[in-house]
Image (tube, helix red, strand yellow):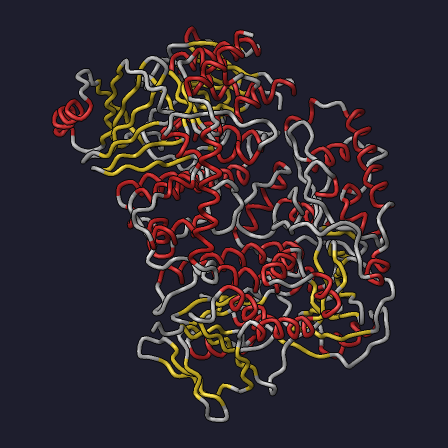
């Protein structure tokens, strides 16, 4: 009889239960046993969570119905992130889950937009006004995208604002129903083979939990990957200097917006995540430039609704483990690394790790090939998200000392080259692997006031008049489409959406992306 | 940009680059000048173009039917590899009928693990059609079939070049020729002008250099080539035969075939190789040419774009440098700068090229030492084809070659682990039957070529 491969997941936050739900969906119970160890004594980070559209695919993957999921997690729909005060104190732009405009004459839309701007075209609107997702977000409208690429409604995507604690509960029920064994216990010792492989976890009550593959979802404590295996950590604080956060829930917004708010503050930024039953708020800040008490005062003063609880404090170090998979231990979630939630990437990075783990799933004993492939994939994902986050801080002309530091800091080469290239030509070279593509980079570049010194050489041959007319007509078409859509709060109240749900696109920007 | 774009080089590569650049930029009023220089080495008599050619022809407005008719063209659904007594088909297209079907390749691997006599090619419409000598252009409303039947062309180089030259003349490109060339630089190290014979100077904005020959010393490559008159219209594919030193590649054309093989070792072995070539093919008239090959990792330097040298660094019978050249030109046009000094853009472009180059080199190395590559190791362990950053090599090519080389994963993917064997086999059988039905209704390549000829004459 074949022995079952024993998988032990340590930690029961969102990362742990997402992992358990996905593994139990794909790994048959006659070949694998999955146990999740969670301690009631150890809390989870579990604040309101803003996501990106990939979460829809994850839910579909594990068989979660969208309507059930929305009800159970108090979720609202999300189309964009609104950035206020980033770049300049009075700036206000959106990073949408969607494309802006369409290519014309074989040239990217933004090149035409920049060129018309250079021509002082009177009717030209802000770049974001050519994005369906942004118009919907600004007008509080919501509708599902479509898959038909000839339809303009295929040029956007959507995600959710959700309650991470409730989401973990839904996932737990799901995973347990699929055969995952849930153990309440606190790990007090970790036993290893001479080669470093983990063999057993000893719990506080004396139980010994044996396993073949250990998945460390223990959060910041990184009990297995760091405290036991001493993997090492790449610290990225020189580029992302914020190191503390405060989180506080407030009353619900009766007309919740379809965007996450990110407002730059004197030494960090404040988030606002509207759910159906409450609003998540928080302040990410740099303790070298702002005291804890001043941070709390700033957060509370910036709330739009009544606070429902005292603020909770978090301390973090931005960066990632040098390796996410070492020996027979795979780190997923905060144990693997931390990037502040400025672009709502936390659950995405968990999701990518789970998908990659399943794709390269090891036999027993674990081979070096699967480890290398997994580690390379995760490194690439983290680095590419990191660079976009750094860009938000770098591009600014704010006067505060914190922002002056950020504006003057040296950049990692990968970002410095990208930035210089955009300045030179207004072009971006796309990569295939990694989350953020051109539309995201452009949203931040243009939203934070970076304009190229030169544009594509072809533009000088164009006549601006017909181009201007095209822009006007295109924008009006988008406005008409948005006006016909239902209000977001009504969609949530009636818990229904016109049209059948289509298969989620595995792109931030929808099926056209 | 006020200064013209000047293309220099010879033959097919020069004409192809000129056609792409001129067609793209003419609507924007750019001045393009092509300067034909003396050939540095003999061009192969035939060329195998990948699936990107069909897209390119559409962009250029150059009918495929015309190329097929003028350049003795045939279709190519991929390559038939012959290793000792075994053979395998490496298609351009994916396996299965839906490119996005998750884990279809893994299902095939699972079947092969259970039944070693099973043949993966029955799940690839391109392979099945190729084996039966069938070929059809997918209807315009069947993007899925077009993808599953991705095809390239085999074309006679001289006639293909003539077609492109005629096309460029019709576009109004200034086509010059010169026996000599001197690059004139300014104080910043940028090319200011080109001096041709009779001291004629041409001002330069960007110089798109399509010359293949390494300027400095490089590795010496020996290229054997031969032609026969056997018409192989029942073979819409090329053939690659494994030999002790590398591969012999046969490209079927209308009215004959072109054979080639490359050797990079000692010149002392050439006579022995020639003898083996004769024995293997029965052809006695093998020609031998040599050229220098040098790696080019930085094709964009200042306003000098060394596209030819970069493409030539990959060119061999198993991979046509023309595909690389097309890629280099198109990617550069995507970024067309308004000034001739943009170092960050050049750096990013060169990095991107290095990625393309490394994927092609990995594919080529796979032929010789599969387990020396990460791709081969990943497949041998997990049955996974690694994600790529470019389309230099198509997914079907990677999977087909890895299977064809005899690699089988130690550890099949677990994403299908909760499916029973019979569920998987039933799914595969459905796809196989659908493929068989589709291929049964397809015309032969000869019929399709005739139809193309008729469309052209109408």
Where residue B426 sits in the image (x, y, percent)?
Answer: 46, 50
Q: In this view, does A1 lie above or below B14?
A: below
Left or right position of B149 against A276: left
Quadrant housing the N terminus of chain B: top right
Where residue B431 sits in the image (x, y, percent)?
Answer: 48, 43
Q: Please indicate, yes or no, whether residue B263 appears anywhere in the rendered image.
A: yes
Q: Which residue corresponds to the image point at 42% horizontal and 70% vertical from the top-left?
A: A31
Tell me the quarter of the picture where residue A423 sits. top right
Where residue B13 sits in the image (x, y, percent)?
Answer: 42, 21
Q: In this view, does A385 lie above or below B176?
A: below
Q: Please indicate, yes or no, whether residue A283 appears anywhere in the rendered image.
A: no
Using the image as rendered, state which of residue A132 and residue A112 is in the foreground. Answer: A132
Left or right position of A113 against B155: right
Using the image as rendered, state which of residue A351 and residue A263 is in the foreground. Answer: A351
Q: Which residue corresponds to the image point at 75% horizontal and 52% vertical from the top-left?
A: A94
Where residue B246 sits in the image (x, y, percent)?
Answer: 23, 34
Q: Is residue B331 above or below residue A204?
A: above
Give the number of marks: 0
Using the image as rendered, state which of residue B31 and residue B450 is in the foreground. Answer: B450
Tell me the quarter of the picture where residue B307 sits. top left
Quadrant housing the C terminus of chain B: top right
């Amino acid at each position: 009889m074949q022995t079952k491969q024993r998988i032990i997941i340590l930690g029961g936050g969102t990362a742990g239960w997402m992992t358990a739900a996905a593994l139990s969906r794909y790994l048959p119970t006659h070949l694998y046993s999955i146990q999740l160890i969670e301690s009631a004594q150890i809390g989870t980070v579990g604040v309101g969570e803003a996501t990106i559209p990939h979460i829809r695919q994850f839910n579909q993957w594990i068989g979660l119905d969208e309507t059930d999921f929305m009800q159970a997690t108090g979720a609202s729909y999300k189309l964009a992130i609104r950035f206020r005060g980033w770049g300049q104190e009075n700036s206000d732009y959106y990073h949408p889950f969607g494309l802006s405009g369409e290519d014309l004459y074989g040239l990217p839309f933004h090149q035409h937009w920049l060129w018309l701007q250079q021509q002082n075209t009177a009717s030209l609107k802000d770049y974001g006004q050519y994005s369906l997702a942004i118009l919907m977000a600004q007008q509080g409208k919501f509708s599902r995208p479509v898959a038909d690429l000839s339809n303009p409604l295929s040029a956007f995507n959507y995600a959710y604002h959700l309650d991470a604690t409730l989401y973990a509960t839904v996932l737990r029920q799901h995973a347990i129903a699929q055969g995952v064994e849930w153990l309440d216990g606190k790990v007090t010792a970790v036993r290893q083979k001479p080669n470093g492989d983990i063999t057993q976890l000893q719990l506080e009550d004396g139980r010994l939990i044996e396993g073949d593959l250990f998945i460390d979802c223990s959060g910041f404590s990184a009990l297995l990957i760091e405290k036991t295996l001493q993997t090492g950590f790449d610290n990225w604080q020189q580029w992302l200097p914020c190191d503390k956060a405060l989180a506080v829930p407030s009353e619900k917004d009766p007309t919740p917006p379809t965007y996450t708010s990110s407002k730059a503050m004197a030494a960090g930024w404040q988030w606002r995540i509207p759910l159906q039953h409450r609003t998540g708020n928080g302040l990410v800040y740099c303790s070298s430039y702002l005291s804890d008490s001043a941070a709390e005062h700033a957060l509370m003063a910036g709330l739009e609704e009544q606070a429902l609880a005292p603020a909770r404090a978090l301390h973090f170090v931005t960066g990632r483990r040098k390796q996410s998979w070492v020996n027979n231990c795979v780190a997923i979630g905060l144990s693997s690394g931390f990037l502040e939630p400025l672009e709502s990437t936390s659950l995405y990075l968990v999701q990518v790790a789970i998908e990659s783990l399943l794709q390269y799933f090891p036999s027993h004993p674990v081979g070096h090939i699967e480890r290398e492939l997994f580690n390379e994939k995760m490194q690439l994902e983290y680095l590419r998200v990191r660079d976009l986050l750094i860009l938000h801080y770098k591009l600014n002309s704010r006067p505060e000392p914190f922002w002056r530091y950020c504006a003057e800091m040296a950049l990692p080469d990968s970002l410095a080259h990208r930035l210089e290239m955009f300045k030179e030509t207004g072009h971006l070279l796309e990569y295939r692997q990694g989350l953020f593509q051109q539309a995201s980079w452009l949203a931040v570049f243009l939203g934070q006031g970076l304009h190229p010194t030169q544009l594509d050489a072809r533009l000088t041959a164009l006549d601006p008049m017909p181009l201007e007319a095209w822009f006007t007509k295109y924008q009006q078409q988008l406005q008409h489409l948005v006006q016909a859509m239902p209000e977001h709060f009504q969609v949530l109240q009636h818990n229904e959406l016109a049209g059948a749900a289509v298969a989620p696109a595995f792109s931030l920007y929808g099926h056209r992306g | 940009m006020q200064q013209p774009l000047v293309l220099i080089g010879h033959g097919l590569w020069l004409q192809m680059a000129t056609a792409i650049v001129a067609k793209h930029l003419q609507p924007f009023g750019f001045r393009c000048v092509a300067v034909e220089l003396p050939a540095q080495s003999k061009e192969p008599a035939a060329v195998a173009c990948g699936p990107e050619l069909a897209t390119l022809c559409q962009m250029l407005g150059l009918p495929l039917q015309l190329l097929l008719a003028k350049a003795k063209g045939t279709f190519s659904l991929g390559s038939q590899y012959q290793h000792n007594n075994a053979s395998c088909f490496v298609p351009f297209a994916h396996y299965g009928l839906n490119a996005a079907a998750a884990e279809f390749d893994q299902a095939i691997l699972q079947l092969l693990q259970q039944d070693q006599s099973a043949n993966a090619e029955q799940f690839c419409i391109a392979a099945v059609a190729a084996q039966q000598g069938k070929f059809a252009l997918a209807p315009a409303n069947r993007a899925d079939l077009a993808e599953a039947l991705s095809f390239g062309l085999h074309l006679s180089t001289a006639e293909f070049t003539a077609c492109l030259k005629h096309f460029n003349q019709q576009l109004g490109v200034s086509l010059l020729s010169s026996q000599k060339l001197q690059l004139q630089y300014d104080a910043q190290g940028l090319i200011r002008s080109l001096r041709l014979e009779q001291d004629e100077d041409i001002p330069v904005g960007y110089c798109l250099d399509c010359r293949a020959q390494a300027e400095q010393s490089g590795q010496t490559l020996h290229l054997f080539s031969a032609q026969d008159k056997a018409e192989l219209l029942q073979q819409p594919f090329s053939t690659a035969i494994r030999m002790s030193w590398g591969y012999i590649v046969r490209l079927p054309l209308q009215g004959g075939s072109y054979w080639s093989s490359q050797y990079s070792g000692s010149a002392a072995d050439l006579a022995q190789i020639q003898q083996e070539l004769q024995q293997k093919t029965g052809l006695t008239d093998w020609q031998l040419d040599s050229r220098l090959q040098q790696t080019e990792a930085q094709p964009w330097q200042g306003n000098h774009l060394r596209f030819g040298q970069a493409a030539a660094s990959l060119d061999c019978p198993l991979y046509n440098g023309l595909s690389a050249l097309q890629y280099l030109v198109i990617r550069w046009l995507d970024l067309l700068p308004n000034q001739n000094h943009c170092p960050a853009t050049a750096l990013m472009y060169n990095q991107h090229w290095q990625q393309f180059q490394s994927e092609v080199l990995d594919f080529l190395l796979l032929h010789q030492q599969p387990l020396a590559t990460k791709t081969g190791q990943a497949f041998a362990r997990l049955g996974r084809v690694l994600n790529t950053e470019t389309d230099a090599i198509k997914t079907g090519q990677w999977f087909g070659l890895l299977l064809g080389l005899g690699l089988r994963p130690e550890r099949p993917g677990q994403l299908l682990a909760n499916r029973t064997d019979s569920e998987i086999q039933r799914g595969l059988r459905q796809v196989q039957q659908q493929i068989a039905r589709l291929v049964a209704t397809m015309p032969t390549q000869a019929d399709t070529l005739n139809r193309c000829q008729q469309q052209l004459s109408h």
